[in-house]
Image: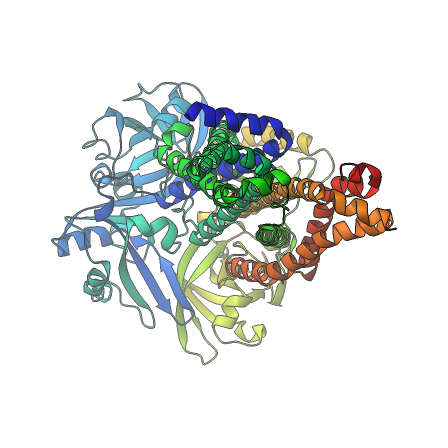
């Protein structure tokens, strides 16, 4: 019996191959998109959950409130030991200080720039690591000990059997490999390949950090002996900051955050290079909704076409019922047809998803999965969706057609093809509304990206090549002579040196400056340490006072320039009023000599913060070259040659400044690519469905068109009649989609401090584009039907 049902299903598909291919294609694409959505969402929601103690790990952080606002910081070195000593419920702690170093393998004469983390020896107790070689208990106890990942071992030594081997840190300090661990999973809120013992930093390089309560940058993780109420524990922490930090006008608050919430729900904290990454829960919601809408289009397309095609089977139903088939048997036949079809779609979708998995990983920028079989939960969910789609698509023909009178069915008088047409039109409207929303949203996303990349940033980012020399003393000590020699290289126009550049992280210092009421105001400010050429080279405009000059000996260490935001935060309306005011920063004091126009040293996600600019050579690490002429490659070769001669112990590791700055928007670019991909898929599926429905509709209206032409209607008038319905459906879809698209775009733009106004033409483009695509889709069948000889249309009557 089952074989008979499947044989009948196969025969029906074969006899209606065009409809079947259209129907199958839409459902396959929809299931495929849904699979990628499932694995992406599952990946994002499971950040850091692979740790055995994930439920008991919390991050210790600091909020700093001052008159200029609230700064969300990480923690200082002494906070972790203090909290562990004071609270018995804290079982252990581990500190992580993210950084990057140039590592040299002297045996291979090879340099690599690596993201590293200074880590306590308790790192492997608090967190879960899989070890390849070495002892986790002793791996990070001694200074200059390295625990490295499998990837780092292969990159630097060509083997994981490298215990006892040495790497030179920034080309000067030898460090010994004591352990090799498996690579950290991709969904970790911080991910490094090199762990360097914390004793290296706190005992050998900077022991003053051990007692500095306001030197932030450490990520401190507390392991509790059981799950804890974070709010209740935060209340206990309130009294502790004032015991160790006394600063008038500034309030410090210690807090803990659950490890599982750090990626999606915690605020970004710290400004170290390689700072712990944060995700965006809103993007997950958006991606989920859009993928769901695409699946909705695909499934209802499948249902739409299936119900339309079922009308063709009316006579078959009549024959079956005349031969004694029961209603239950006919219902089962329709169900088996739909399930057979949906299972074919399910299998094809999995095959295509497996082939596209590497491409999807590339678009997302993360290796979410390498094997489709690793995602069995998602595969089972898709199987359920495919079955559900099949069952729902079979409900109409199974219930309605199986109840037809066999005599009426055989005469062709009971089925006109109009049953369910209202539902089909409603679904078409919804499909086009979704397509219009996606088109408008895509335009907004790319317009915002273009705005961020091309808006006036307040500085010049073009034709700049930057080298990070990692605070090399020989460069800092011979700064002027080196800049002079590099300036003689053909194609080099200007050279400057600084502690930071726009788009990269910068230091923060406690700063004290009198406000408009002459009251000393203390705040944590972003800081740039630069040379005399930096402001001019980067085209940063001085709007009050003056820039740095070698004519003033006090400009070295004793002069400060503020940005507009810093001046405004102090209450001054006129930038000239702050000139000559005294400042105190760290151990230095001096006078404010100038104010620069605000420039975007961070991304457009963030408001321009108060910034102080000074000359302090000891903290320089970037050398910037302005290039001119057309032979950029030749200039770079000449620069590299000169660099190797002048600074032989540091590799010439460079990057182009404009590319590096724009890298801040990689996440938005990937989001844009995903969005436009989903929009195109939605439009294609909608058009496939419309193509199938138009073919069915034209077939149903063949005799009507013939009669109209016999009665004198022209081809043009018939064509207008046939396209009028499509135009009305698209207009209704546009009316439905426009407010929803505006709301979605406005909500997404709220994540940017500096943003575009939603362009009116995006709505016009979405509506017109959808209308044109719809008309082009149905044009073949409408034109063919309108031009057909009415004699042929009516010859069977």
- The picture places residue 340, in percent across and down from the top left corner, at 47, 30
Q: How many marks?
A: 0
Where, by quadrant of the figure, is residue 455 drawn?
bottom right
The residue drawn where x is 24% and y is 41% is 120
Closest to the observer, 304 or 75: 304
In-front residue for pair 516/27: 27
Q: Position of residue 752 (x, y in %)?
A: 53, 59
Q: Is residue 604 left or right of residue 135?
A: right
Quarter of the figure with the C terminus = top right
Q: Spot the residue most to the bottom.
A: 517
Q: Determine if residue 211 is in view.
A: yes
Name the quadrant of the N terminus.
top left
The colour scheme applied to this rendered structure is: rainbow
- Side of 494 relative to 670 (left or right): right
Position of residue 447 in the picture relative to residue 111 (left or right): right
x, y percent for residue 127: 25, 39
The answer to whether residue 756 is seen in the rendering is no
Q: x, y percentage for residue 406?
A: 55, 40
For image coordinates 30% across by 48% down, the residue present is 260
**Front-lying residue, 585 or 762:** 762
Vertical order, 455 against 189 (above or below): below
**Residue 256 location, quadrant:** bottom left
Q: Is residue 159 left or right of residue 94?
A: right
> Which residue: 53% across, 55% down?
601
Q: Nearer the viewer, residue 7 or 245?
A: 7
């Amino acid at each position: 019996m089952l074989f008979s049902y499947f044989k009948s299903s196969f025969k029906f598909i074969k006899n209606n191959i065009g409809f079947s291919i259209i129907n199958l294609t839409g459902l396959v694409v929809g299931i495929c998109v849904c699979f990628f959505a499932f694995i992406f969402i599952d990946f994002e929601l499971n950040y850091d959950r692979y740790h055995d103690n994930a439920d008991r790990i919390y991050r210790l952080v600091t909020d700093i409130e001052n008159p200029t606002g609230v700064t969300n910081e990480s923690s200082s070195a002494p906070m972790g030991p203090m909290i562990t000593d004071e609270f018995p419920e804290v079982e252990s702690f581990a500190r992580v200080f993210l950084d990057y170093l140039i590592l040299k393998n002297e045996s291979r004469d090879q340099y690599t720039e690596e993201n590293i983390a200074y880590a306590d020896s308790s790192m492997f107790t608090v967190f879960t690591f899989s070890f390849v070689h070495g002892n986790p208990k002793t791996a990070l106890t001694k200074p200059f000990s390295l625990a490295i990942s499998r990837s780092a071992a292969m990159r630097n030594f060509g083997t994981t059997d490298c215990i006892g081997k040495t790497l030179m840190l920034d080309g000067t300090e030898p460090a010994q490999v004591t352990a090799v661990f498996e690579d950290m999973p991709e969904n970790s809120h911080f991910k490094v390949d090199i762990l360097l013992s914390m004793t290296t930093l706190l005992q050998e390089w900077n022991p003053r950090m051990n007692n500095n309560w306001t030197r932030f940058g450490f990520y401190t993780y507390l392991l509790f002996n059981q799950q804890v109420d974070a709010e209740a524990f935060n209340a206990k922490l309130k009294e502790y900051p004032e015991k160790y930090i006394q600063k008038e006008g500034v309030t410090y608050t210690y807090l803990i955050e659950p490890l599982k919430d750090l990626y999606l729900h915690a605020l970004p904290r710290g400004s170290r290079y390689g700072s712990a990454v944060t995700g965006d829960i809103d993007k997950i919601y958006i991606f989920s909704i859009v993928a769901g809408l695409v699946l909705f289009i695909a499934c209802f397309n499948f249902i739409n076409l299936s119900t339309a095609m079922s009308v063709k089977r009316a006579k078959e139903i009549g024959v079956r019922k005349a031969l004694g088939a029961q209603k239950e048997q006919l219902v089962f036949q329709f169900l088996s047809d739909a399930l057979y079809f949906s299972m074919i779609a399910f299998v094809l979708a999995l095959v295509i998803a497996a082939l596209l998995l590497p491409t999807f990983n590339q678009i997302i920028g993360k290796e979410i999965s390498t094997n489709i079989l690793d995602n069995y939960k998602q595969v089972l969910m898709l199987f359920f969706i495919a079955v559900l789609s099949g069952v729902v698509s079979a409900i109409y023909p199974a219930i309605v057609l199986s109840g037809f009178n066999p005599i009426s069915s055989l005469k062709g008088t009971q089925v006109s093809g109009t049953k369910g047409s209202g539902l089909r039109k409603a679904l078409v409207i919804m499909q086009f509304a979704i397509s219009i929303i996606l088109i408008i949203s895509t335009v907004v996303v790319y317009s915002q990206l273009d705005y961020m990349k091309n808006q006036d940033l307040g500085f010049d980012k073009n034709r700049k090549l930057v080298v990070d020399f990692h605070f090399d003393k020989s460069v800092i000590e011979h700064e002027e002579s080196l800049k002079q020699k590099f300036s003689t290289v053909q194609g080099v126009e200007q050279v400057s040196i600084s502690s930071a550049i726009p788009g990269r992280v910068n230091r923060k210092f406690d700063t004290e400056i009198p406000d408009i009421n002459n009251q000393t105001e203390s705040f944590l400010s972003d800081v740039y340490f630069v040379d005399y050429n930096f402001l001019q080279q980067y085209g940063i405009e001085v709007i009050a006072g003056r820039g740095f000059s070698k004519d003033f000996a006090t400009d070295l260490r004793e002069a400060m320039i503020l940005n507009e935001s810093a001046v405004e935060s102090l209450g001054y309306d006129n930038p000239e009023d702050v000139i000559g005011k005294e400042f105190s920063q760290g151990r230095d004091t001096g006078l404010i000599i100038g104010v620069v126009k605000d420039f975007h040293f961070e991304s457009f996600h963030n408001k321009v913060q108060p910034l102080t600019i000074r000359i302090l050579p000891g903290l320089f690490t970037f050398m910037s070259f302005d290039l001119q002429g057309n032979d950029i490659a030749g200039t770079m070769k000449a620069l590299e040659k000169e660099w190797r001669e002048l600074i032989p112990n540091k590799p010439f590791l460079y990057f182009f400044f404009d590319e590096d700055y724009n890298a801040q928007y990689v996440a938005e670019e990937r989001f844009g690519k995903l969005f436009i991909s989903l929009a195109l898929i939605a439009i294609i599926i909608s058009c496939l469905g419309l193509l199938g429905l138009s073919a069915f509709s034209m077939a149903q209206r063949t005799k009507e068109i013939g009669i109209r032409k016999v009665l004198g209607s022209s081809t043009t008038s018939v064509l207008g009649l046939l396209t009028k319905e499509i135009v009305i459906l698209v207009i209704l879809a546009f009316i439905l989609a426009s407010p929803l698209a505006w709301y979605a775009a406005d909500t997404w733009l709220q994540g940017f401090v500096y943003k575009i106004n939603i362009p009116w033409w995006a709505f016009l483009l979405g509506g017109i584009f959808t209308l044109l695509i719809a008309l082009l889709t149905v044009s073949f069948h409408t034109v063919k039907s309108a031009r057909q000889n009415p004699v042929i249309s009516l010859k069977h009557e």
